[in-house]
Image (tube, helix red, strand yellow):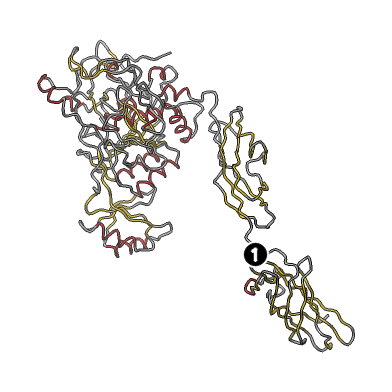
Amino acid sequence: MRLIKALVVLTLVAFAFTDRPSAQTAGAGRFVSGEIVVKFRPGASANAKADAHRQAGGRLLNEIARTGVQLVAVPAGDEAGAIARYQRNPNVLYAERNFIRSIPTPISHGPGSDVMPSDYYFREQWALHNTGQLFYCILPEFCFYIGTPDADIDAPEAWGMSTGTAVKVAVIDTGIDYTHPDLATNYDGGNDFVTPDGDPWDDHGHGTHVSGTIAAALNNPTGNPAEEEGVVGVAPNASILAYKVCDATGNCTDFAIEQAIAQAITDGASVINMSLGGPEFSQSSYDAVQDAWNAGLVIVAGAGNDGTTAQFYPAAYANVISVAAFDEDHRRPTFSNYGNWVDISAPGNVILSTYPLSACGGGSTVPGDTGCYNWLTGTSMATPHVAGAAALIWSRGDVTSNSQVVNILLNSADPQGVDAVRLDSWTIHGGLNIHNALSYGVTNLPPVANAGPDQIVADTGGDSVELVTLNGSASSDPDGTIVAYEWREGSAVFGIVANPDVWLAVGTHTLTLEVTDDDGATATDSVSVTVNPATAPTTAHVGDLDGSSTGNKGSWTAQVTITVHDTGHQIVAGAVVTGTWNSGASGTGTCTTNGGGTCVVVSNSMRKRVNTASFTVTGVAASGLSYSAGQNHEPDGDSTGTAITVAKP
């Protein structure tokens, strides 16, 4: 047998109580000594960057061209001080530690229209097809585990629909044994971001195990007489891009991870698997993940093995599918993180997959068992089941975007499971089921209605109604187009376009948007719009001054029309306006506004040699309102709002 297992029963019993999950949480605050990560603001010049490094005492080590994130050497022990110095520079967007995320040393386990593959160890892969079988069997009658029927992801049922295509899945991990007979066919290259040799050879084991869960070959014969080799992956036709970011001890720096994410985008990956993480939020890591999402990739990461609801990064970042583990009974193992931030669960307990050949002492000639295989446990093992499922969904002919893949994958999850405790009681959506995912919305995916954010507006006209623009433009249809919009409040229809303008009375309104796609499916969303009453005006001011003049051969007079507004720029009737004439005219002027909010003052008669006359408003008296000269204004530009000059005719 090519499984990694003890040869002596007493040794097996000793292993029985040393079960540890893989991909545990890194210790809080772990970072690379003498290194930080720096991101400059867009537009910062090369000279400005060089000056920043000189002033902060840093030295550029490396840069990710795609994102502009730089790895900078600083004196060991002075990381916090260096970060503070960089952050004081106006050209620096952020500076932070180069955090270390973790993958612990993998160990062998102690107890803790279907397409049915004939791969040598498929019977041990309960995660794919659980019949209640015995597994992790050291001898034919000596097995440590027994499953519960249907506590699995329904892989044979899914493969009856599709075994997928050569979708590229980037495994950001410890590398890969690309000579493994179950992986060689689907290996599509990679890179090493730990050492500069460019070779993603796995000197740890974790990445090889993860890669096999995703894309170990299906029914691939080895040996003579030939037998189907080893195990099978969730997406057995997918292509693996292996990026080594973790060293032989299982430590992985943020900068290396971010380099791999950028490389995955460049190399045309459709899915990223990260079975690693830590408790620290990192801005540069977050930005790298968002860059991948915006480039159209699906990102999947393990939720962590602390057995708590604590968030774990990168799984907890936006636009990452966070994955918990379920066991062979559809229950949450005690090690798995969980909670309202975890999207989905997948098989993660005692998972059999590929392992570096060197761990089994090299190659073998046993037909169907020429590779090396091992059982590992953890959300690290659950995550590649979901990444493989994402690759299968990408293979569907009706899927064209990463948001579609995520929508199908999460909305097709099994909410109940076979245990009394529902799978969606400790994750958001429940447990992975790839048959549901390949079946989901085959005829039509439903549209998504988006009624926009809630609104609070004021009655600007003081007439107890306000014109409001509703916004349904963010509504979408993942596999077609939206052909109809309908906005309702109760049974009353307010609009039949995406962004209607509607009059709403003072008060709070709940409006429902219903959208219909080109296949007749509908979806709804609601928005709350509150129209607050108009605020009672407290001041009056001049809203307009207009001048004119009339005359004869010997003299002329000037007239000024004054418009008075209140605080809300509404006309004020009955306001008494006072002012003075000067610059050619003399005396005072007084008038009272009419129902249109205007009144007229007229100057004394002036001789023809006088070219101009000016009028300055000195007061406005209106019931319940105080005069606010500072609000005086002139829409036409022919006065200051307080004073106006009139020319002779």
The answer to whether one can see residue 546 in this image is yes
User: Dividing the picture into quarters, in which one does residue 566 lie?
Assistant: bottom right
Left or right for 448, reference 132: right
The answer to whether one can see residue 487 in this image is no
What is the total number of numbered labels drawn onto the structure image?
1
The answer to whether 75 is drawn above or below residue 556 in the figure is above
State the image coordinates of residue 34 (x, y, percent, origin top left).
22, 54
Q: Residue furthest right?
A: 553
State the image coordinates of residue 483 (x, y, percent, origin top left).
63, 34
The answer to whether 191 is drawn above or below residue 374 in the figure is below
Q: Residue at x 57, y 35 (%)?
A: 524
Q: Residue at x 29, y 44 (%)?
A: 279
If the image is split into quadrants, where does the C terminus sit? bottom right
Q: Residue furthest top?
A: 225
User: Dividing the picture into quarters, in which one does residue 240 lie?
Assistant: top left
Left or right for 407, reference 121: right
Q: Residue at x 27, y 15 (%)?
A: 120
State the image coordinates of residue 189 (x, y, percent, origin top left).
33, 33
Q: Residues within 10 Å of mark 1 (few under 14, many from 20)?
A: some
Residue of label 1: 537
State the image coordinates of residue 457 (x, y, percent, origin top left).
60, 53
User: Dividing the picture into quarters, in which one does residue 322 lie?
Assistant: top left
Left or right for 619, reference 264: right
Q: Amino acid at mark 1?
A: Pro
If the image is split into quadrants, where does the N terminus sit? top left
Element under label 1? loop
